[in-house]
Structures are given as C-alpha cells and as structure tokens.
Amino acid sequence: MKKVLIDDAILVSNYIKGDENSLAVLIERHKQRIYSFVYSKVYDRDIAEDIFQDTFIKVINTLKKGRYNEEGKFLPWVMRIAHNLVIDHFRRSNRMPKFDNSGEFSIFSVLSDNSLNAEKQIIKDQVESDVRKLIEELPEDQKEVLMMRVYKDMSFKEISERTGVSINTALGRMRYALINIRKTIEKHNIVLTN
C-alpha cells in the first residue's frame, strides 16, 4: 500500500483549524533540512537546536494569530524565519560581517554557502532588494555614504574626499545610517522578506 503524502498547505490549514498533529507532521517532514541549514551557518549543535526551536515557536505564533498567507510555500517561509533568527544570533554575538574591502558587501557574507540552491537564491535576492528599499528611506547624506561604502566599496578616505567632509563625519554618517536602518526594521517589525 503506497503511503500518500498530505500537502504542506493542507497540513497548515488543518493545524490552523485545531489539528495539533498536523504541525507535528510538518516539523517531522522538514526538520532535517531546516536544522541542517541552521547548523551550516552557526556550526554549534546547541545554538542550532535553540534557533531551530525558536523558528518553530515563531511559526506556531504566526499560525495561531492567523498571519500566515504563504499559499503553499511553507518550507521557504520557515527557512526565511530560520535565516532571520540566524542573523539575529550573529547580531547579538557581534559577529555580523564587518564592512571590509573584499568586494561588494553582502549581508550574506557571514552566511556564505557556495551551494545556494534556487530557493535560497530567491530568498537572498528578496532580502537584498528589501535592504535596498530601506536604504532609500535614509536621509540623503547618510544614504550617499552608505551607498559609496557598501555598493561602490570606497574607503572612508575616498568618501571623505568625494563628499568634501572629514573622515570622522563620513564614519558618523555611516554609523547613523546603520542605526536608522535597524530602527526602521524594529519599528515596523520588518522581516527582511516580502
């Protein structure tokens, strides 16, 4: 007798309607991929386990509040939650990538994974597009410095010469740009995805 796999979307719908077992099936179905993804970023079993559990706490809270609307894209949605929690972990432990001069800055430089599959690539592109939208909201002087530093890979000395301000002013504008982006993310409770 062939075992019929129930579609993720149906399991999500059943869970929202009160069938707790449907969530257990979803977790069992996807736990290996999600845990492996998290572990491949943090290289620590305890931290990976914590982030994995936090991911599903967020999933449960979102589903219970009726705020899930991913139309059958359950796994990519859960992967985005896990990915954001990994970024939060690095932020808390001050291990976010520094702005160095090694090519174009990417928020993913700390999470580099040579085998970005199509799903991860879509999520990566969306996050980077969302980050660019946040940059557009910045005051002009901060946006200018951030764009030169991050996307044009200019040194603060070059930025200072180009903009006619001191290196300290350029550094200050960069710092405020990052603070303002973080505030916008927190204020609007933005998850860096659409």
Image (tube, rainbow, N blue to C red):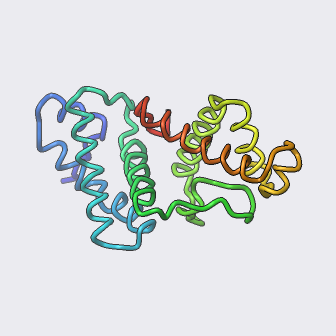
Q: Quadrant of residue 13?
A: top left
Q: 132 or 159, which is in the foreground? A: 159
Judge from the rendering whether residue 51 lies leftward or rightward of residue 168; answer left or right: left
Image location (x, y in percent) of residue 173: 67, 43
Q: Residue furthest bottom?
A: 44
Judge from the rendering whether residue 13 lies leftward or rightward of residue 138; answer left or right: left
- Relative to 1, does residue 181 appear above or below in the rendering? above
Image location (x, y in percent) of residue 72: 37, 35
Question: How many numbered discs sit on the rendered protein?
Answer: 0
Q: Quadrant of residue 142?
A: top right
Judge from the rendering whether residue 120 lies leftward or rightward of residue 157; answer left or right: left
Write the residue at 73% across / 48% down. Answer: 170
Write the residue at 27% across / 34% down. Answer: 62
Image location (x, y in percent) of residue 104: 73, 56
Write the residue at 41% across / 53% down. Answer: 88
Image location (x, y in percent) of residue 105: 68, 55
Write the residue at 53% across / 62% down. Answer: 111
Q: 31 or 81, which is in the foreground? A: 81
Judge from the rendering whether residue 93 lies leftward or rightward of residue 134; answer left or right: left
Q: 57 or 114, which is in the foreground? A: 57
- Relative to 46, does residue 76 appear above or below in the rendering? above
